[in-house]
Image (cartoon, rainbow, N blue to C red):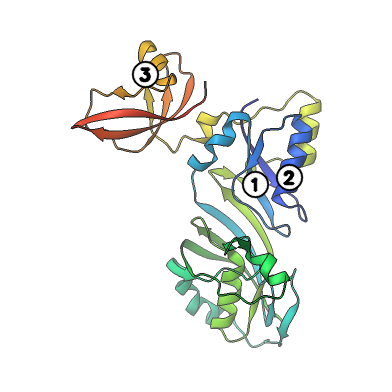
């Protein structure tokens, strides 16, 4: 049993909880996930099973979310799971004012992750330090937001904004909610978060744990083949003798010098997926070097 699962994570479950449940449902030990989701978030959680756990690092990195932000409130965790720091009504806030500053969050931006996050500082997770009452300097990171689109505006004493966000890896949507509220001088916190895209997997094609268990019981469940999930990578096919040597860990000299020096999917002539190789330049010749051999 090798491949990927597009899991729709339920509210309240940690990513680790989901891995444990998938292990039980599929009755296999080798299960991992790509891209942690907070317990309060729902949506796409990529799951790898069997040998595919070695391939998580090669999946597409871009992500997309649907988020709802509440203004006038600041919390310790930058979402509703934390304690309220300040709460001040801001009924005069308008969507027009928000639209005037929202563009500042697109492109490559500097972001300070939430104090309650899984980032390690000095060998400790930030959330562990925060729970212990310790104050640390959270490292600033560069993230990229390719698009923010307004989906809905809900005025009131504590108005709320719903947005779709497409972004690169390492982006904290809670931090966007916090920083947007600070920029507007009213405070902001994340109300809800749904991940709609991760590692090339879309929410519309996902299954939740109940659906997964039912499909397995009915014998209707199939994992996503690794080579399909990795279609973002280029493909190379080896002749039978070369494929055998490559699977044995040998480097293969390539006849072409115009190939990108990148990660490649390796297949044999039977169109069987063998693993991942990297093309390197060695003495003015391109070499196909094994990186992960699955056979």
Q: Position of residue 44 (x, y in %)?
A: 64, 48
Q: Residue at x 72, y 71 (%)?
A: 132
Q: Residue at x 66, y 56 (%)?
A: 194
Q: Is residue 202 above or below residue 278?
A: below
In the drawing, does residue 217 fall left or right of residue 271? right
Looking at this view, name the residue that lies furthest to the front: 122
Specify whether residue 169 is in view: yes
Q: Which mark is residue 45?
A: 1
Horizontal arrangement in the rendering, residue 77 relative to residue 179 (left or right): right
Q: Which residue is mark 2?
A: 18
Q: Are marks 1 and 2 in contact (CB under 8 Å)?
A: yes
Gap in angstroms between the C-alphas marked 1 and 2: 9 Å
Residue 104 % position (x, y): 45, 74
Residue 238, disc: 3
Q: Nearer the viewer, residue 249 or 95?
A: 249
Name the element at disc 2: helix
Q: Position of residue 238 (x, y in %)?
A: 36, 18
Residue at 56% x, 84% y is 184
């Amino acid at each position: 049993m090798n491949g990927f699962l597009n899991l729709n994570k339920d509210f309240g479950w940690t990513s680790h909880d989901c891995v444990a449940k998938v292990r039980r449902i599929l009755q296999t030990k080798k299960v991992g996930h790509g891209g942690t989701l907070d317990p309060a978030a729902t949506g796409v959680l990529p799951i790898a099973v069997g040998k595919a756990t070695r391939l998580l690092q090669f999946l597409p990195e871009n992500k997309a979310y649907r988020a709802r932000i509440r203004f006038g409130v600041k919390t310790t965790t930058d979402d509703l799971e934390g304690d309220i720091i300040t709460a001040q009504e801001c009924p005069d806030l308008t969507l027009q004012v928000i639209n005037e500053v929202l563009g500042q969050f697109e492109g490559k931006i500097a972001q300070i992750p939430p104090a309650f996050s899984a980032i390690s500082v000095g060998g400790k997770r930030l959330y562990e330090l925060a729970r212990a009452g310790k104050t640390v300097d959270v490292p600033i990171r560069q993230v990229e937001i390719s698009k923010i689109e307004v989906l809905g505006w809900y005025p009131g004493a504590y108005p709320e904004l719903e947005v779709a966000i497409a972004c690169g890896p390492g982006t904290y949507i809670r931090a966007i909610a916090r920083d947007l509220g600070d920029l507007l001088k009213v405070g902001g916190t994340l109300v809800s978060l749904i991940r709609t895209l991760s590692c090339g997997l879309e929410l519309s094609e996902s299954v939740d744990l109940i659906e997964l268990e039912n499909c397995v019981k009915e014998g209707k469940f199939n994992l996503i083949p690794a080579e399909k999930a990795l279609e973002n990578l280029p493909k190379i096919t080896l002749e039978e003798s070369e494929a055998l040597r490559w699977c044995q860990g040998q480097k293969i000299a390539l006849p072409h010098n115009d190939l990108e020096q990148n990660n490649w999917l390796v297949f044999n002539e039977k169109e069987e997926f063998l693993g991942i190789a990297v093309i390197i330049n060695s003495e003015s010749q391109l070499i196909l070097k094994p990186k992960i051999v699955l056979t």
